[in-house]
């Protein structure tokens, strides 16, 4: 029990200090098509923020089937699909929003950044030329709500 208690206290302390322990040890299974450079760049972003990743390359038809099975619909998709702790992470979702999702644990399918906005993680540098985008929370009934906005 003392080890479990220390682990819980360490997790609580890190949540107060920015949530990095939520990411530490978090493993994201990523499904993508072979050779997608922005998918690889997104996984590097996750790894730089404490996650481990594993990429499974699939033919496009199989990848779309997995997206549909996960509860995603057209208009909510991007080039890659991740899974962590029972949630779907679709597209170029920033690591800090995954941290928040895992801390808050909403009853939802997961998060998505539809399409591939420039300036999102893995899609170029944020800055004055970046596209504004929303991170959407995908609810179990298929509806969405804005989880975070990036200018």
Image (cartoon, helix red, strand yellow):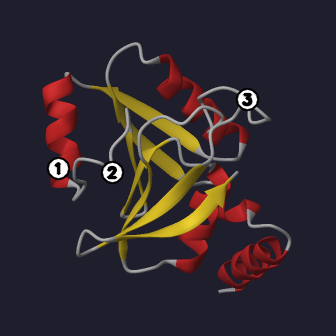
> Which x, y percent locates residue 75?
29, 48
Q: Earlier in the sequence, mark 1 or mark 3?
A: 1
Q: Earlier in the sequence, mark 2 or mark 1?
A: 1
Q: Residues within 10 Å of mark 1 (few under 14, many from 20)?
A: few
Determine the secondary structure under disc 1.
helix
Task: Where is residue 38? Give x, y as percent.
Answer: 52, 24
Which tag is nearer the camera, tag 2 or tag 1? 2
**Residues packed near mark 2 inside 10 Å, few (<14), some (14 to 19) or many (20 plus):** some
Q: Is residue 92 left or right of residue 11?
A: left
**Is 73 placed left or right of 38 in the picture?**
left
Residue depicted at 51% across the width and 38% down the height:
53
Which residue sits at x=74%, y=67%?
A: 19
Is residue 24 visible in the rendered structure shown here? no
The disc at residue 68 is 1
Q: Which mark is residue 125?
A: 3
Question: Do tag 2 and tag 1 residues touch (Cβ < 8 Å)?
Answer: no
Rounded to the nearest angstrom, the CA distance separating label 3 from label 2 is: 23 Å
3 or 2: tag closer to the N-terminus: 2
Is 125 situated above or below 26?
A: above
Q: Which mark is residue 76?
A: 2
Q: Is residue 103 left or right of residue 36?
A: right
């Amino acid at each position: 029990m003392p080890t479990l208690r220390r682990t819980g206290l360490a997790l609580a302390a890190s949540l107060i200090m920015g949530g990095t322990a939520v990411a530490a040890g978090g493993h994201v299974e990523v499904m993508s098509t072979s050779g997608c450079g922005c998918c690889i760049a997104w996984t590097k972003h996750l790894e730089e923020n404490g996650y481990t990743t594993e990429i499974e390359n699939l033919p496009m038809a199989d990848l779309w089937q997995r997206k549909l099975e996960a509860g995603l619909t057209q208009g909510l998709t991007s080039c890659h699909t991740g899974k962590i702790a029972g949630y779907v992470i679709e597209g170029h979702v920033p690591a800090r929003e995954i941290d928040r999702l895992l801390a808050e644990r909403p009853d939802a399918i997961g998060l998505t950044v539809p399409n591939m906005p420039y300036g999102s993680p893995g899609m170029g540098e944020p800055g004055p030329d970046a596209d504004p985008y929303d991170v959407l929370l995908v609810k179990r009934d298929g509806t969405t709500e804005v989880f975070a906005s990036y200018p």
